[in-house]
Image (spheres, grey):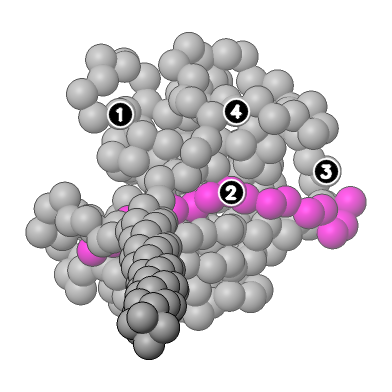
Amino acid sequence: MRAEKQSIIHKQRKRRTTMRRGATFGAIAVAIILIVVLIQVSGGSKKKAATTTTTSSTSTSSTTTSTFPVPSTLPLTSVAVPPTCAPKGTTKRVVLFTKAPPDCIGTTSVWDATFETSLGNYSVQMDAAKSYAGVNNFVFLAQWHYFNGTFFHRIITGFVIQGGDPAGTGTGIPAGSTQKVAFPGYSFTGNVPPKSCTAKKDCYATGDLVYANSSGPSTDGSQFFVILPGGGPSLTPSYTLFGQVTSGQSVVDAIGALGIPSSGETGTPKEKVYLLKVILKQVKA
């Protein structure tokens, strides 16, 4: 009887030990499963975040693509207002005026303008003594944030990069709009290069900042272009020269590389390059 009782006790102890081991192994298994699930959930969250923050390249046509987000900017004004020199520090944006600007700068003033673009920055210097109307007009528009959020609508490799149209169409009128007057709402008379230059040879140089026009300097407005290497000789001396690139020519060239190689085309670029803003600094009174 004693031996049988001891055998029964031994079996009960063995069964309890086995149950404890089973519980331990079960707990370990549950812990391992929880860890695996947590890892999978954590990994899934990271993949989802990466997907939502990655900007993909989307093509809207065979010639125009953009990997840069459209910059947020103040809306375009559609009612023409009388021009006044912008108050210092104004945040208001105006792009349509009833006439050309008044005198807003000194006749001998010199200005540096930094063009912040989606491909980098370049700077130009503008001397009012050499082109007063041209510099005064550009400073006036820049101080009203006219150029902010626009893009270079015409880029021709080996020739020019052109911008300054808030409509982005090259006509000064937004696509599909019934607007009658093109931005900026006026034209003004600039100045041609000095007579000492030789037509289509040395009137314009690489990096020159020049106004675009429809029929001579009396039709200057807001659209401008920067001359790319080799582009100067292609121009007749009928465009207002009012500035010169002083730094960042490599950025200008990079923008130019996104254009088409023929001046006989419209110049719609391969990629939309934004002019985020123009920062002015007066360096001489």
As shown in the figure, which amino acid type bears the numbered disc 1? Pro
As shown in the figure, which amino acid type bears the numbered disc 3? Gly
Give the residue at the far front of this rendering: 1
> Observer-nearest residue: 130 or 254?
254
- Whether 265 is drawn above or below 72: the answer is below
Residue 263 point in image, percent of width and height: 21, 65
In this view, the mark in front (3 or 4): 4
Mark 1 vs mark 2: which is more N-terminal? 1
Q: Residue at x 30, y 70 (%)?
A: 258
Mark 2 vs mark 4: which is more N-terminal? 4
Question: Can residue 284 be seen in the rendering of this structure?
Answer: yes
Please indicate whether residue 205 sits to the left or right of residue 139 in the image. Answer: left
Q: Which residue is mark 3?
A: 106
Mark 1–mark 3 CB contact (< 8 Å): no
Q: Residue at x 36, y 34 (%)?
A: 167
| Alpha carbon separation for disc pair 1 and 4 | 17 Å
**Magenta part mainly helix, strand or loop?**
strand
Please indicate whether residue 126 sits to the left or right of residue 18 in the image. Answer: right
Q: Which residue is mark 1?
A: 174
Instruction: Give the label on residue 277, or none.
Output: 2
In this view, the mark in front (2 or 3): 2
Question: Can residue 39 be seen in the rendering of this structure?
Answer: no
* Residue interval drawn in magenta: 270-285
| Alpha carbon separation for disc pair 2 and 4 | 12 Å
Residue 160 point in image, percent of width and height: 37, 66
Q: Which residue is mark 4?
A: 93
- Whether 114 is drawn above or below 9: the answer is above
